């Protein structure tokens, strides 16, 4: 009798729950109170003896729900694809904040996965890279806008690949564009209503440089 046979596994499982005070599980599986008390009082040696004979009194029936099995296996395939994409992002230089944005990763998850992939030498703490050059930034933004139909994670990765730069540089270029656009909104002429004749007058805000 193998220790890892289904009947032995069930005996282990039930006995552990009995010792934890969870008698309902044993009752649901069909054990009566006399059997539960006997299992509760077993010594280790007695348990091992009973374990070798568990197939004589524990019958296991396995039923496979094929529609749900296929659905779960498809989800496993999707999980593998997602994991592969995450690893490719890390290997392409994805910074910590991006993995948190895309996948909800904590700093610890980020560090641990980089260690598994042996990526600790460059930016071990997900540090901020130098700004891309103007030419690099223009290349990045051109590819980013062209790849707008992709999912966000794929868009970052493909923009980096097409630009020949790291995902960190892609993030930095996008951040610089956002900063310029925000600054442009702050300096945009404000349209005010002139009550005397009902005309709209453009009042241009002036800023000191």
Image (cartoon, rainbow, N blue to C red):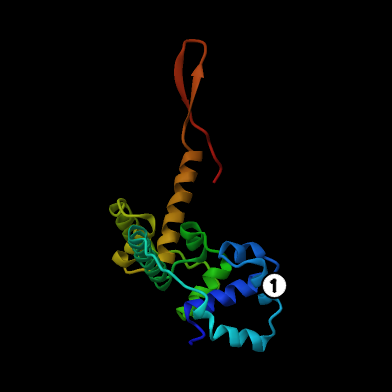
Residue closest to the eye, 16 or 189: 16
Q: Quadrant of residue 78?
A: bottom left
- Visible in this render: residue 122? no
The residue at the point 31 percent across, 54 percent down is 150
**Vertically, is 138 above or below 184?**
below
Where residue 154 sits in the image (x, y, percent)? Answer: 35, 60
The residue at the point 47 percent across, 39 percent down is 185
Badge 1: residue crowd in 10 Å (few <14, some 14–19, many ≥20): few
Residue closest to the eye, 81 or 30: 30
Residue with the mark numbered 1: 37
**Vertically, is 58 above or below 140?**
below
Residue closest to the eye, 111 or 40: 40
Where residue 47 sits in the image (x, y, percent)? Answer: 63, 84
- Visible in this render: residue 102? yes
The residue at the point 61 percent across, 63 percent down is 27
User: Relative to 196, is 16 on the left or the right?
Assistant: right
Where residue 110 sits in the image (x, y, percent)? Answer: 52, 69
Where residue 178 sits in the image (x, y, percent)? Answer: 45, 50
Give the farthest residue toward the front. 34
Mark 1: which secondary structure? helix
Q: Quadrant of residue 134?
A: bottom left
Give the farthest residue toward the top. 197
Count of all numbered marks drawn on residues in the image: 1
């Amino acid at each position: 009798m193998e220790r890892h046979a289904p009947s032995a596994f069930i005996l282990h499982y039930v006995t552990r729950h009995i010792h934890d005070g969870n008698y309902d599980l044993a009752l649901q599986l069909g054990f009566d109170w006399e059997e539960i008390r006997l299992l509760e009082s077993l010594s280790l040696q007695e348990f091992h003896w009973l374990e070798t004979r568990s197939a004589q009194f524990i019958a296991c029936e396995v039923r496979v729900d094929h529609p749900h099995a296929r659905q779960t296996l498809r989800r496993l395939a999707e999980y593998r694809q997602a994991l592969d994409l995450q690893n490719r992002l890390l290997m392409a230089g994805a910074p910590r904040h991006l993995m948190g944005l895309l996948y909800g990763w904590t700093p610890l998850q980020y560090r641990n996965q980089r260690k598994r992939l042996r990526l600790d030498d460059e930016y071990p703490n997900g540090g901020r890279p130098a700004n891309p050059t103007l030419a690099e930034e223009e290349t990045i933004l051109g590819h980013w806008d062209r790849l707008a139909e992709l999912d966000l994670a794929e868009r970052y990765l493909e923009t980096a690949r097409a630009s020949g730069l790291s995902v960190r540089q892609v993030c930095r270029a996008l951040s610089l564009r956002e900063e310029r656009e925000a600054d442009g909104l702050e300096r945009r002429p404000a349209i005010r209503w002139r009550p005397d004749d009902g005309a709209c007058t453009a009042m241009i805000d002036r800023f000191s440089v």
